[in-house]
Amino acid sequence: MKALFSVTIILAGFLLSSPVVMGQSKFAFSITAAPFYGQIKSKNSFVIPSGTGGEPITTEIKSKTTTKGYWVGLNGRYSFSSKWSASTGLWLSESWQNVPQITPAISVYTGRSRSHNLAIPAMVNFQTSERRLSPYFSAGAMWNFSTTSRLNISSLETNFTFKSNDSKVTPMVGAGVIYNFAQHISMIAQPIFQYIIPLSGIHSQTYQLNLNVQLMYRF
């Protein structure tokens, strides 16, 4: 029994540490799935005319909301060397968020919104070794170029649809692992953090954390 246990440990160590002979092509293709969680905090000041004809009143309004959803997409990757690569693709997201919590409280409506977003990621990737299991790091940005949102106001029994083609660039970084199943097939898993840069004049903090999983095929 002890001998069987020892052999099992040795084989597991060999599988995780031994290098895999990769294909000669520098190109690879992958599919992506990434559930995510996001949060939006904003703080803005508004000047409200006084009802008595006196000096205008400056009011600060804070809001907070959370977003949940997922990304799916296709990627292409080009390897500069055995450790460095660059990747891009086309991703589609679907997300849901509740009406923001506003301070001071404003009882106007309650409801929920659903959004679809198209984006193009561009990443530089680094893996520390060619072993079967290796740490995998990525850094880059995502270009969001098309958003469709549907807002359901339950208190008014009303639906609104908003479409936007405004471009937004989102920096992102990720750290995880790559596991090489065979010469041509690998899996990448890494949490990715994104920070959305607010538009000029808007005071907000928006971030998104997703668990990015890719199944990759090397040609």
Image: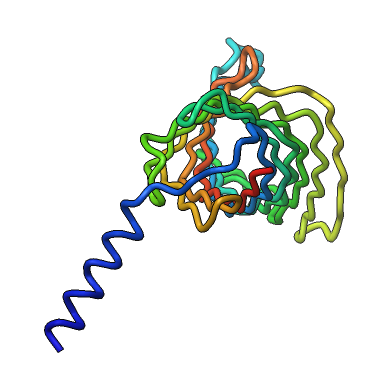
> Looking at the image, which is closer to me, 163 or 21?
21
Side of 126 relative to 201 (left or right): left
- Quadrant of the frame with the N terminus: bottom left
Q: Nearer the viewer, residue 207 or 141?
A: 141
Residue 14 to residue 147: above or below? below
| Residue at (37% x, 42% y) in the render | 135
The answer to which image quadrant residue 121 occupies is top right
Instruction: Note whether 205 is above or below 156 in the view shown.
Output: above
The residue furthest left is: 2
Asked if residue 117 lies left or right of residue 87, the reply is right
Residue 55 visible within the image: yes
**Extreme residue in the bottom direction:** 1
Q: Where residue 15 appears, x then y in whole percent?
A: 35, 60
Residue 49 appears at what percent x and percent y?
Answer: 66, 17
- Percent across and percent down for residue 41 are 51, 35
Q: x and y percent of residue 18 in the render? A: 34, 51
